[in-house]
Amino acid sequence: MKITQQDLTDFVGEPNFHKAGLHAIKRATGIVGKHYCTKMTMATMCPLKCGECKKTLVDMVAAINPETTRNAYALLTWLAKTTAAKKAEKKSVARPTGPAKNAFGEAEERDPFADLEVSFGR
């Protein structure tokens, strides 16, 4: 679910956008929607309530320092992509594998090489 311009402005606050050098709030909303909200939705990690991502969004805008940044919108893009990727990486940690299970959900304990020996007649 993409965040609306009004929600993002309410969460971050218009003065904070200007302090970060992000004067075109509509453009910043498009960047956040495209590179953060869409990625979170595609990874099925979007909470569907934009308020739950409020802290993340505020931290992204607060991390931009206009004195040391040439292009605040490029930095916002990078922050949005990186934040979404880190959250997706935490979710996709490999699950431990267990023993093989048959169609009934029962664990199968068999030697796969035994089947090959039977097939080749040894």
Image (cartoon, grey):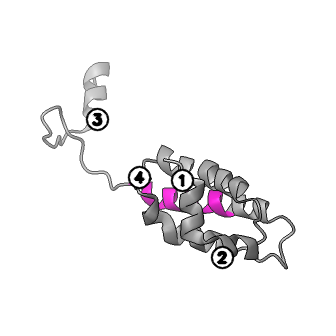
Secondary structure of the residue carrying numbered label 3:
helix
Spatial CA distance of label 1 from label 4 is: 10 Å
Q: Earlier in the sequence, mark 1 or mark 4?
A: 1
Secondary structure of the residue carrying numbered label 4:
loop
Spatial CA distance of label 4 from label 2 is: 23 Å
- x, y percentage for residue 5? 60, 55
Amino acid bearing label 1: Ile
Q: Is residue 110 left or right of residue 119?
A: left
- x, y percentage for residue 15? 68, 75
Q: Which residue is mark 2?
A: 62
User: Where on the picture, by quarter, is residue 85?
Assistant: bottom right
Residue 49 drawn above or below residue 101: below
Q: Nearer the viewer, residue 121 or 52?
A: 52
Q: Earlier in the sequence, mark 1 or mark 2?
A: 1
- x, y percentage for residue 82? 63, 61
Main SS class of the magenta portion in the image: helix
Q: What residue occupies the far right of the structure in this picture?
A: 70
- Camera-near label (1 vs 2) is 1
Q: Nearer the viewer, residue 69 or 24?
A: 24
Q: Which residues are magenta?
A: 79-94
Q: Name the mark on residue 112.
A: 3
Q: Residue at x 54, y 68 (%)?
A: 11
- Camera-near label (1 vs 3) is 1
Residue 2 drawn above or below residue 72: above
Q: Earlier in the sequence, mark 1 or mark 3?
A: 1
Q: Name the mark on residue 3.
A: 1
Q: Residues within 10 Å of mark 2 (few under 14, many from 20)?
A: some
Q: Marks 2 and 1: in contact by CB < 8 Å?
A: no
Residue 121 visible in the snapshot: no
Residue 59 lies in the magenta-colored region:
no
Q: Name the mark on residue 48.
A: 4
Q: Residue at x 28, y 35 (%)?
A: 112
